Amino acid sequence: MSNKIEFVKREQLKEKPDPKNLGFGQHFTDYMLSYDYDKDKGWHDLKIVPYGPIEISPAAQGIHYGQSVFEGLKAYKHGDDIVLFRPDQNFKRINNSLERINMPKIDEDELLEGLKQLVDVERDWVPEGEGQSLYIRPVVFATEGTLGVHASHNYKLLIILSPSGSYYGGGSLSPTKIYVEDEYVRAVRGGTGFAKTAGNYAASLLAQTQANKEGWDQVLWLDGVERKYVEEVGSMNIFFVINGKLVTPKLDGSILPGITRKSIIELAKKLGYEVEERHVAIDELIELHDKGELEEVFGAGTAAVISPVGKLKYEDREITINNFETGEMTQKLYDHYVGIQSGKIEDPNGWRVVVPKY
């Protein structure tokens, strides 16, 4: 698809927010992408419409039975260009999520074209400060207004855009404090852990809130069966530097296959680091720390890109990693990753996708 899609203009454009106080997910652009599905027409009526409230039935199945999936990616300003970062991977993953909870798949190429046209319309909303970006949130939810537990026959897809500030406030990487959750679990193999479903995030909120109250930034989840193997942080995949080797939990169906995770693994290998994907027990990490072999820990995800971990708490143990400082490998991977995103470093893999001017 390369034809211009329908564009419904609003009467008056919004006043743009102060670029020094963007925060995350607090401001939204003038327009959004809208797409509808019903069992007779399939996906239809793709168009750009004014951002604003939508009408939905009180009986909409997405509200009652949780058929809702989403994605998160970013657009960056590089000179006169607006650039997306590996958007094809997000649309592949949203289809995997849709399939897992029995929702109709989308045409990945068609939706990517729609996104490009939306971002082109909203070029002036892409911030250009250090570490700033236009956050992109595709979401799909069931809209059929009938009760009864079955797959909906009607759905809506929206893509909304939000100018966002630097995760670290424009400064250097700041280590975080992570609480290892040993009471609640996030997901189990055979469940929906690998899918980006709304319910997965709802299930994480109680533990996250409790951890925050105790002064911890994020929760590190253990596997849901043996409660011993590290899986992921609430909003990031997790990586460990052990004796110079980059180690991360392997994907086995209960961990979200992060696009940042995938990119970091590929980048690390190109930079000459040894990378291993395997089960990692929390007791092993404590033991490695005590022997001085757990050199660095960091999380990787769309929001922060890379977030160094300076402290871990598990049961009655609190361990400090690398003197609560950002490690050498963490910093190098961050610099190269952000350099590719921003266009400051060559992109040999074609990860950057320039948004055309339509």
Image (cartoon, helix red, strand yellow):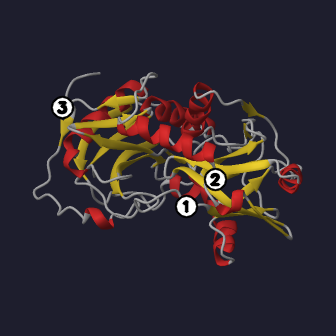
The extreme bottom residue here reads 213
Residue 251 in the figure: left or right of residue 83: right
Q: Earlier in the sequence, mark 1 or mark 2?
A: 1
Instruction: Pick the residue in front: 192 or 179.
Output: 179
Which label sits in the foreground, 3 or 2? 3
Rendered image quadrant of residue 82 = top left
Amino acid carrying label 1: it is: Ser
Q: Earlier in the sequence, mark 3 or mark 2?
A: 2
Q: Residue at x 62, y 32 (%)?
A: 265
Instruction: Pick the residue in front: 46 or 42.
Output: 46
Disc 3 target residue: 357
Q: Is residue 205 above or below residue 141?
A: below
Q: Residue at x 80, y 49 (%)?
A: 223
Disc 1 target residue: 174
x and y percentages locating residue 44 in the rendered image: 33, 33
Which label sits in the foreground, 1 or 3? 1
Residue 80 in the figure: left or right of residue 203: left
Disc 2 target residue: 200
> Could you tell me which secondary element the residue under label 3 belongs to?
loop
Q: Within 10 angstroms of label 3, few (less than 14), some, or many (20 or more) residues?
A: few
Assign the N terminus to one quadrant of the image.
Answer: top left
Rendered image quadrant of residue 290 = bottom right
